[in-house]
Amino acid sequence: MTERTIQDSASLTGWRKSSYSSGDGGTCVEVLDCHPSGIPVRDSKTPHGPAVVFSAAGWSSFVTAIKDAKLLF
């Protein structure tokens, strides 16, 4: 698998906070919809840092795994 990243994620607009991020301003994951390369994901605390770009299938699997894991705790 080739890892895809965007080095400066601030160069993109339209980020939204994941609904699974905490509401206290601490742990925040942001995602960008409708990007031609897939689903970019970044840490909101470092907006000029890199974003990892998931394939649509990879992102779906990741979200499903997180939802399943939450049921265990």
Image (tube, rainbow, N blue to C red):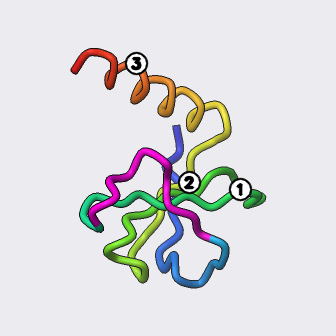
**Mark 1 = which residue?**
37
Q: Which mark is residue 63?
A: none
Q: Earlier in the sequence, mark 2 or mark 1?
A: 1
Q: Earlier in the sequence, mark 2 or mark 3?
A: 2
Up-down: is 8 above or below 57? below
**Mark 3 = which residue?**
68
Q: Which mark is residue 53?
A: 2
Q: What's the residue at 68%, 51% (across, down)?
A: 38
Splitting the image into 4 quarters, where does residue 25 fall?
bottom left
Q: What element carries label 2?
A: strand
Where is residue 31 shown, x and y percent of the image? 55, 58
Tell me the kind of residue under disc 3: Asp
Q: Nearer the viewer, mark 3 or mark 1?
A: 3
Where is residue 33 shown, x and y percent of the image? 70, 57
Please say whether residue 22 is one of the residues in the magenta stretch: yes
Where is residue 72 shown, x and y percent of the image? 26, 15
Give the Cα separation between the discs numbered 2 and 3: 22 Å
- In the rendered structure, the answer to whether residue 15 lies left or right of residue 17 reads right
Q: What stretch is highlighted in magenta?
A: 15-24
- What crowding class fits label 3: few (fewer than 14 Cα within 10 Å), some (14-19), or many (20 or more)? few
Q: Tell whether label 1 touches label 3 (CB within 8 Å).
A: no
Q: Is mark 1 on a helix, strand or loop?
A: loop
Splitting the image into 4 quarters, where does residue 71 fall?
top left
